[in-house]
């Protein structure tokens, strides 16, 4: 008997812009192959609407695969092309370790919390 591959649950994405031109983009669910296209489309619409300074709240992301890591790089490049940036907020211990192992934390700033990521003067963790 062949068991079909598990399909990822839908990724819930919420966006909260603030009055200083930053937006917190919160993900809830696994950041994996299959959830990436929907997230990418949402981010492209945000950037097209002028929201180019994004804090990615990963506090509700229990798992991220290489597709998810690649998505973060693509988002960083897209926002950078439009004069913006991204900051990674509240990743799990495992995801933080994966960002370190892959050296992505060298150009994707990682913060312990959304509040720290929003604060322009907070040092990256």
Image (cartoon, grey):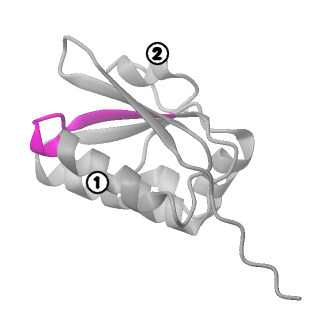
Could you tell me if the residues under marks 2 and 1 are in contact, i.e. CB atoms within 8 Å?
A: no
Q: What residue does disc 1 label?
A: 41
Q: Residue at x 38, y 54 (%)?
A: 38
Q: How many marks?
A: 2
Q: Residue at x 11, y 37 (%)?
A: 49
- Within the magenta stretch, is there residue 26? no
Residue 53 coordinates in the image, percent (x, y): 24, 34
Q: In which quarter of the view is residue 120 placed?
A: top left
Quarter in which the N terminus is drawn: bottom right
Quarter in which the C terminus is drawn: top right
User: Magenta region: which residues?
Assistant: 47-57
Q: Which mark is residue 91?
A: none
Q: Which mark is residue 115?
A: 2
State left or right for residue 4 relative to residue 53: right
Which residue reaches farthest bottom?
1
Q: Secondary structure at mark 1?
A: helix
Closer to viewer: mark 2 or mark 1: 1
State left or right for residue 25 relative to residue 32: left
Q: Residue at x 62, y 41 (%)?
A: 61
Residue 21 coordinates in the image, percent (x, y): 18, 21
């Amino acid at each position: 008997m062949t068991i079909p591959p598990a399909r990822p649950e839908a990724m819930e994405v919420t966006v909260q812009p603030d009055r200083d031109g930053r937006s917190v983009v919160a993900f809830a669910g696994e950041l994996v192959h299959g959830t990436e296209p929907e997230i990418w489309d949402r981010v492209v619409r945000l950037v097209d609407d002028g929201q180019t300074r994004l804090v990615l709240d990963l506090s509700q992301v229990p798992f991220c695969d290489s597709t998810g890591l690649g998505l973060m790089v693509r988002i960083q490049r897209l926002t950078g092309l439009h004069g913006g940036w991204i900051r990674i907020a509240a990743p799990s211990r495992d995801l933080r370790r994966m960002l370190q192992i892959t050296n992505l934390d060298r150009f994707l700033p990682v913060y312990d919390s959304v509040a720290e990521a929003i604060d322009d003067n907070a040092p990256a963790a």
